Amino acid sequence: MRNTQRQKLLISRQEMADLARVKRPVISTWARRHLDFPEPVAGDHRHPLFDAREFGDWLVATGRASRKDIDGDLQSYTLTRLTTEFSPRTLVSHLTSLICLRHLNDDEPLHGDTDPLPGLVRLAADLDPDNAMLEEEIEALHAEWLPAQVDELVEAAWGTVNAFERVMDLRERLGATDLAAVRLAPELVRLIALLTDAATVADLDPRAARIYDPHAGAGDLLVAVAATLRDDQPVHLAARCGDLYLARLLRRRLAVRNLHDGEFAVYGDESDHDGANIIVTQLPFRPTEERSTVGSLKLIDDIAVQLCPGATAVVIAPSDTTGALNPHSEAASLRAELIAGTVKAVIRLPGGLVPYRPGYETSVWVLGTDHQSRRGEILLADVSDRPLTNVVVDALVTDILAWRHPEYDPRAHAHIHAIRTPVKAIVNDARALTPRHLLTELEFSHDVPERVARALDLERILDEARPGHRLPSHVELDPSPSPPPTKTIHELTRGGQQRTNLLSLKKGTRICAEHVRPRKHMHSASSAAVIGAPELAGRCAPGDRRIDRLDLASHYPSAQLSRPGDVVITTVPEPAVLIDHQGYAVIQYPARVLRITEVGAKQFTPRVLAALLTQAPRIRGAIRAVERIEEIRLPILQEESMERLDNLLAELDDRRQAIRHEKAALDELHRLATRGLTDGTLTLTANTIH
C-alpha cells in the first residue's frame, strides 16, 4: 500500500521531450551542454529514467516552460501511471468523485486527516445524501494515498473544474475506451456549440437557456454548449443517460461547474425534453451491419417532435442519412416529412471526426420551429472534401445563423459553403441532400469569372506555343448558368428491365503477388498486362506488370480482360482514374472497371468519363474514401457539350504526348552532345537554315 508521501515520477527521454514540447534529440543536446541538467535516477545506460519533477523544475528555472504548464503536464503523467493500479472505469470513477467531493466541500483539501478515508466517507454521505453521484464511489475507495494525489492534481490544474476536465481529456490515455469511443474531434464540438447560438437564445428567453441532450454519454456536448454562454446568463442543463455509470459521472461533471440543484438534471431512459429551447446530441453509434438509415431518421424525428416553439436542435447523425434513397422506401418518406417540417440545414462532414472510429462518417442536422426562417428552402452544405478547420467552422456557422436571422438579406450575405435549395426538389426525387456539383453564391460571383479569365489566358499561351494549331474549342461564361442534372454511378449502372444502363461496373480480380512479374521477365505474347493501384497511382506504367496467361487460366478462370476504352477506377489507397486504351488487361482488385454501354456512348466517352470521375476527392483524416464508387455523382452533359469536351481533351492529350516525346528527345540530345564533346568524338558546327 502506498503512503501519502510524494512518490517519484519516472519518465524516459522521449517523455521528457514530450513534456518540454521539443524533438527527442534536443534532450540529449541539453544533457551534454548543461552541467546542471538532471541526472538519471533509475534504469540503465541504454534506457535511463529521470525524476520528472526534477526535470520540470529545471525547465522552469531555465525559462523553457512555465510552472503552470509543467505542473499540469506532470499530473497528467502521474494519472497515466495509475492505470497499473486501477481498471480504467474505476480510476476515472475514483478521480472524478474525489474532485467533485472537494468542490462540494468548498474546495477544502481532501487529505487533512491522518486517516482520511473514513472522514471522506462521512463527508460524501452528508454532501450526497441521495447517493446520486459520489457516495458509493467514495465508499469503494481503499487507496489511502489517492486523496493526496487528487489534491496535487487540483492545485496543479488551478481548480476543480480544470482538474475534472483534465481527467476527461486523458480518457484515451487512461484506457477508458467506453468514454473515448464517442469522443468527437474538437473542431466538430465547436461547430455544434456555435450552431446552437445559445447566447442569443438565452437573451431572448427571460427564464434561461434550457439545454437538453437525449443521448448525453459523458456530456461533452452539454459542457461545450454551456461554455458559450456569458457568466450573467442563467442556464438549465438536462440529459438522458441510460448507463448508470455514465449518468453518475455526468452528474459529477456538471456539479463541479457551480451548477446547483434545479440547474441541472440527469435522467434515465424515462426522461423527455423538459421544455428545452436547445437540444443538442450525437446519435448512438451502430456498426454498419446493424445501422439503418430509417433507424437514424427515426431518432432524428423523435427529437423533432419534442421541439418547443422557437427551439433549435443540432444533431450529429451518420452520413448515410444524407445519401440518395429509394423514393418509395420508408426512409425516403420519413426524410421528406422531416425536411418539409423542421429541418433547416444539413451539413455533410469529412471523415475522421470521431477519432476512435475514423471510418465512421457523420453529418449535422439543424432543426428548428421558428417561423422566421425561409419557407420552402433549406440550406445544404458538403465539406466532406476538406478538413474541418476553424475557418471552415466559422464559415458554416455564419452561413446558417445569418440565413436563419429574421432580418436576413440575401443581397448582403453570399453563402460560402451552404446552398439554398428548394425543399420540393429534394422531396420529389429523394436525391442526396448534399450535391457537390452545385455552386454556392460566393463561388459563382467570384470564382467562376476568375476561372473563365484564367482559362482564356491559358488558351492564349497554348496558341502562342503552337501557332497554327488552335484548340478545337474555348471557354466562355454561360449566359444562363445552371448545373446539369446528375446521377450516381449506382443509378447509371442499374438500368433495370429497360436495359438503359449508361455504364457497367465490374469488379477487379484478386491476384496473388507471386503471380505478378515485371515486363522484363515476361514475354508479351504469353502474358497479359496487369492494371491495379500502382498503375493508377502513377508508380509504374501500364504494361510494366504482367501475369503469365497459363497462371491466369489455371488460378483465375473467372477473370475477365478489359476492353479498349475501359475506365479503371479505385478509391484505395487513394482515388485515381486511368483509361485503358489498349485493353485486354487484367484489372487487379481493388481497382474496378467502368465500361460505357452502347446507350451510354451518347452521354460519355472514355476521356469525358475519366475527367468527370476526377472530381471526387478524398479528405485527409479518414481511413477510406469519403464516398463509395457507387455513390459518386456524375453530371449528365448535353450531347453537344460532351462532344466538344471530348475533342478538347483529345487535343490536350495529343499535346501532352508530343511534349513527352519532345522532352525525351531534348534530354537524349543533351546527353549525346555533352558526352561527344567531352570524349572528343563529336564537334558542333553552325546550323545553316535553308
Image (tube, rainbow, N blue to C red):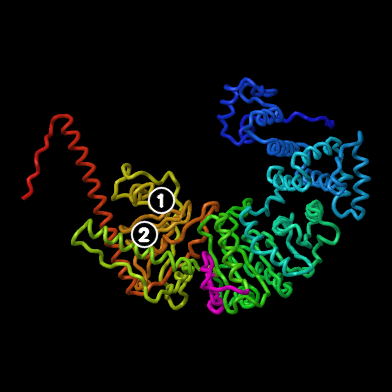
SS at circle 2: loop
The residue to which callout 2 is attached is 562
Q: Where in the figure is residue 629, as x and y percent of width and height? A: 48, 62
| Type of amino acid under label 2 | Ser
In this orientation, does residue 330 appear?
no
Residue 283 part of the magenta-drawn span:
no
Image point 68% across, 61% down: which residue?
A: 282
The span shown in magenta is 406-432
Q: Quadrant of the N terminus?
A: top right
517 or 61: which is nearer to us? 61
Quarter of the view holding residue 393: bottom right
- Note whether 662 is above or below 264 in the view shown: above
Label 1 vs 2, first from the N-terminus: 1
- Amino acid type for the residue under numbered disc 1: Ala
Residue 233 place in picture, x, y as percent: 76, 61
Q: Residue at x 12, y 34 (%)?
A: 682
